[in-house]
Amino acid sequence: MDATVKKFMDLVETKNPSEKAFHQAVKEVAETILPFLDENPKYKAVKVFERMIEPERVIIFRIPWIDDKGEVQINRGYRIEMNSAIGPYKGGMRFHPTVDLGVLKFLAFEQVFKNSLTSLPLGGGKGGSDFDPKGKSDEEVMRFCQSLMTELYRHIGPDTDVPAGDIGVGGREIGFMYGQYKRIRNEFTGVFTGKGLEYGGSLIRPEATGYGTVYFAQEMLATINEEIKGKSVAISGSGNVAQFATEKIIELGGKVVTLSDSSGYIYDKDGIDSEKLAYVQNLKNIKRGRIREYADEFGAKYVEGVSRPWMEKCEIALPCATENELNEEEAKALVKNGCICVSEGANMPSTPEAVEVFLENKILYGPGKAANAGGVATSGLEMSQNALRMAWTREEVDQRLHNIMINIHNTCMKFGKEGDYVNYVKGANIGGFVKVADAMIAQGYV
Ligand code: NDP
Ligand code: 2IT
């Protein structure tokens, strides 16, 4: 490790012990930002980067609720208000048993750069709970969401902090949290994004992260005169992001051969078509079943206990499940099997060693903070529509989303070009950093 990065990381690790995911996210950014600071001393002198790794505010709270058996349950709630230099805190809520302070700080930190890349006025935040929605009844989820919001309402607002969905938080959970906020505050306002269409949601927001990840892949492929049409695509996950990445790949003439959940993955040599995707959406969103059932229904291969489909042959890989779901060995297998493009729908799905393999082999690699920014960008568009008290058409929102992804790609090209190769990691980190850093300098030591 470079000595400057090591010194910086020693400080981060000492100050934030046992926050491994946060260390990983900061280190990845530090590797490109610290050299950039040496070339641009105006940022270094006022310690902008040192300030950016310190959240503006962290809220941790108790969430008591009663389960269907009448027993008291206690979860922990969080909201990390990371950076508001360029707009209100913005970022999703995650409900998953692995949620802790370090995970949410990594996500909030990434969100600051991602939101800046969208070119919309969005600061960075993230929140959630160690609550596991799996196996809970709708009533239990509602009681939990209401208890969470009974505390969180005092910290958020349409011009302060605007949460949205993430793992384990979809339309159902957002509805319950929004309802409780409105009830307590007596305000009908755009305090959440990802809302239902009936109460202020935006068309295309559910599709946006998956579509955006594919639009970003399209842009990367165009730089080497390639396209999605006719290519085999491996996708992990089968939730919101994976479903709509699949939908867009099908529309563009690619062939999706894998999907997964935390129990295993399916490989369908014939490809997942629209009809099979509709089955997955019903299975996952309505029945809340397991991906194994897809294999039973369509006679595809199912690998139990392996959630990561990366040893299967593909030309494009879209990791759309969770962090660190693609390691060095899997990255090497992807490259060896002819994969030319990795576009990350998930946040930090590739380990640092895997990223190294992609960069060394000079394949197209779009890191999450650029490639999955379409979700939060469309959240920004939902906020604009709420402020205008208007709703744009599906075509209009999709067009704006597409243009934002093209712009993010251009920003990455601008800051990431290394000869013939585009280092999108460097491009996204520096491209995201500059706007936030300039705003922080303009606002003084706050
Ligand atoms: P969902 O909850 O809708 O889906 C998550 C999927 O990933 C499920 O198939 C789930 O399987 C699987 N998964 C989750 N955790 C694990 C794990 N630890 N190991 C293996 N599989 C796992 O979430 P989203 O689709 O919204 O989010 C997916 C990723 O995309 C996350 O990294 C999220 O941060 C990122 N993202 C999401 C955005 C959004 O707008 N929703 C925007 C930008 C990024 P199972 O059902 O078995 O749990
Ligand atoms: O990681 C992310 O960008 C999200 N989960 C979406 C955040 C948002 O506010 O739409």
Image (cartoon, rainbow, N blue to C red):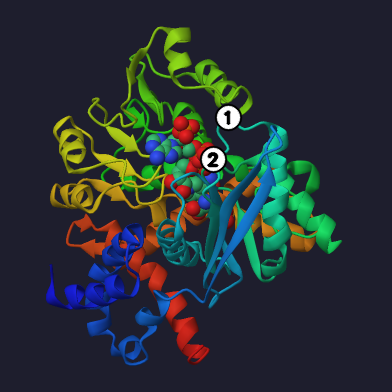
Q: Amino acid at mark 2?
A: Asp
The residue closer to the viewer here, 108 or 275, is 108
Residue 45 position by quadrant: bottom left
Q: Amino acid at mark 1?
A: Gly
Find residue 201 and report its horizontal and vertical position in percent.
72, 48
Report the residue marked by disc 1: 135
Relative side of 197 to 266, left or right: right
Q: Residue at x 24, y 63 (%)?
A: 417
The circle drawn on residue 413 is none
The residue closer to the viewer here, 387 or 392, is 387
Q: Residue at x 18, y 43 (%)?
A: 328
Q: Residue at x 55, y 54 (%)?
A: 128
The residue closer to the viewer here, 413 or 318, is 318
Residue 314 visible to the viewer: yes
> Where 155 sits versus 304, above or below?
below
> Where 56 sits versus 330, above or below?
below
Mark 1 surroundings: few (<14), some (14-19) or many (≥20) residues within 10 A: few
Find residue 59 and report its horizontal and vertical position in percent.
57, 68
Q: Helix or strand or loop: what does disc 1 sit on?
A: loop
Q: How many marks?
A: 2
Find residue 11 and report its horizontal and vertical position in percent.
27, 77
Q: Helix or strand or loop: what does disc 2 sit on?
A: loop
User: Do callouts 1 and 2 mark residues in contact (Cβ within 8 Å)?
Assistant: yes
Find residue 186 and report its horizontal and vertical position in percent.
86, 61
Report the residue marked by disc 2: 132
> Where 119 sits versus 254, above or below?
below
Mark 2 surroundings: few (<14), some (14-19) or many (≥20) residues within 10 A: some
The residue closer to the viewer here, 185 or 399, is 185
**Alpha-carbon distance for marks 1 and 2?**
8 Å
> Where 287 sits versus 182, above or below?
above
